[in-house]
Amino acid sequence: MPTLTRWLIRTALLWLLLALVLGVGIVTPDRLGLPPALAGLRPTWVHFIVVGWITQLIFGVAYWMFPRHSVTHPRGLTALGWAGYTLLNVGLVLRVTGETLTLLGHPQSLAALSAPLQMVAGWTLAAMIWPRVKEK
């Protein structure tokens, strides 16, 4: 299994674990002694699941399993994959931090910065996989 695939899948699993913990905190804050304002992090929870878990898992498996690009570069430009991985996760961390700070009354600058990073990450990861989608 390629190194990038391992990183994508393991990081996806970490986001899933974080989503599960956050989900419990959102649904039952009173039982855990947490502030009810935690319910304001539902969009963050959805982002953990959709971008952190599902999207990263899909790209990790696609990078590993899709047909070879060429003999010399079987998986295409690995640098694109690492750039996409980094941008995606930095964007997720900024989103989480930004939405948490917004709940505390701070401006939304970090959350707003996260969206373009994640968009470019998606483009980068798609550009890495695109040439590998071909007929037999």
Image: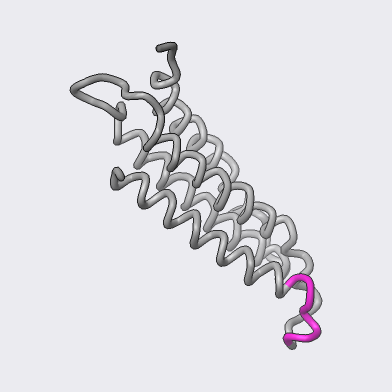
Picture quadrant where residue 108 is located: bottom right
Q: Residue furthest top?
A: 135
Picture quadrant where residue 34 is located: bottom right
Please provide percent x and percent y for residue 115. 60, 43
In the image, is residue 28 part of the stretch drawn in magenta?
A: yes
Residue 34 vertical placement versus 7 (above, below) = below
The image's colour scheme reads one colour
Q: Residue furthest front?
A: 136
Instruction: Indicate left or right for 53 with 81 as reference.
Output: right
How many marks the image carries: the answer is 0
Instruction: Indicate left or right for 89 with 101 as reference.
Output: left
Residue located 21% across and 21% down the image: 71
Please provide percent x and percent y for residue 57. 50, 46
Most frequent secondary structure within the magenta stretch: helix
Between 25 and 83, the one lying in front of the other is 25
Residue located 74% across and 60% down the image: 42
Give the position of the C terminus as an image quadrant: top left
Residue located 57% across and 60% down the image: 16
In the image, is residue 65 part of the stretch drawn in magenta?
A: no
Residue 105 vertical placement versus 83 (above, below) = below
Residue 97 vertical placement versus 29 (above, below) = above
Please provide percent x and percent y for residue 44. 67, 58
Give the position of the N terminus as an image quadrant: top left
Q: In this picture, which residue range is highlighted in magenta?
A: 26-32
Between 49 and 39, the one lying in front of the other is 49
Between 130 and 89, the one lying in front of the other is 130
Instruction: Indicate left or right for 118 with 87 as reference.
Output: right
Please provide percent x and percent y for residue 5. 37, 45
